[in-house]
Image (cartoon, helix red, strand yellow):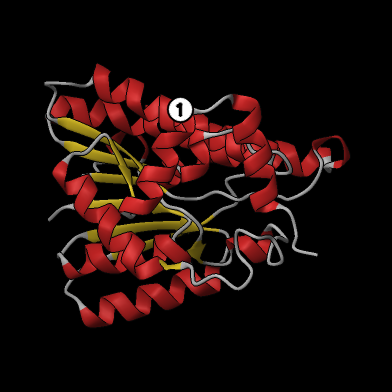
Amino acid sequence: MATAFITGASGGIGRELAKIHARNGHNLILAARSGDRLNAIKRELEGAFAIRVDVIVIDLSEPGAAHRLFESAGGKDLQVDFLINNAGFGTFGMFAEAEIGKTEEMMRLNIEALTVLTRLVLPGMIARKSGRIMNIASTAAFQPGPLMAVYFASKAYVLRFSEAIANEVQGSGVRITAYCPAATQTGFQTAARMEDSRLVKNRKLDSAENVAEDAYKAMMRGKTVAIFGWINALLARSTGLFPSALVSKIARWMVERKS
């Protein structure tokens, strides 16, 4: 029976991906900060499907947390068929005024934890000549992001990192996917304090369920880069046609709070 290892699995896209894998008969290793939510998902999915769900309560924004998570999940003996690096968060505001500790946590979670987990899991997949790794990036990865500078930059890292290692593992039986949703109905906007931004306010956002379904299909097809929705894809890909300064101005206008 295949096993899926999902970070940020207590809600949003991560939780919906856990449900999809469960429906497909995959055992689960779920990691997140909220033990109560993880255990509720464990009870729900084990009750509905003939699978095993292991939960690991951990804050991946802490130094060294990715190594601790890997060891808790099985270490060198860990065999997973699907690694989904979904955990991440963003903050809103001027970079020069940002809380430096929160910025460091964001970089550790969005970049370091994802990179370390990928590095620790990938060799086993290569040895078995089979596996899928999906790193959740964002349409933010395609442009600079004033007022969310570190978040946008972290997602650009996820995109380019995923593309690079996808090339490295060609022919190995392992496939790497960078999945890029736009703004989605999760707790992200509230956590980032951007409910009043033009990107969110009075807009119908994509549902986490629909995004997760599309992400799963993209991963199973082995797509290297996938963007949810053709309009989102068109907008993301078109940023390269315009001067960076103009793209930055537009991106700032979109994330600014509506007056």
Choose top left, top right, bottom left or bottom right for residue 130: top left
Residue at the disc numbered 1: 241
Kind of residue at disc 1: Leu
Relative depth, front residue between 8 and 253: 253
Whether residue 50 can be seen here? yes
Residue density around tag 1, few if under 14, some if 14–19, many if 20 or more, within 10 Å: few
Q: Is residue 124 above or below residue 39?
A: above
Residue 116 seen anywhere in this rendered image of the structure:
no
Vertical comparison of 243 with 247: above or below: above
Classify residue 44 by image quadrant. Answer: bottom left
Residue at the extreme right of the image, as rendered: 97
Q: Is residue 104 left or right of residue 130?
A: right
Nearest the viewer among 11 and 242 is: 242
Q: Is residue 105 left or right of residue 160?
A: right
Give the image location of residue 55, x and y in percent: 42, 62
Q: Quadrant of residue 96?
A: top right
Q: Is residue 82 left or right of residue 259?
A: left
Q: Which residue appears at 44% of the width and 50% of the height?
A: 86
Count of numbered circles on the image: 1
Q: Quadrant of the N terminus?
A: bottom left
Helix, strand or loop at disc 1?
A: helix
Instruction: Tell me which residue sits at (41%, 60%) in the image.
Output: 14
Q: Is residue 174 left or right of residue 253?
A: left
Residue at image point 37% right, 73% down: 42
User: Horizontal and vertical percent for residue 205?
Assistant: 48, 67
Tell me residue 89's x, y (percent).
60, 50
- Image quadrant holding the C terminus, namely bottom right
Foreground residue among 186 and 205: 205
Residue located at (17% from left, 25% from top) = 127
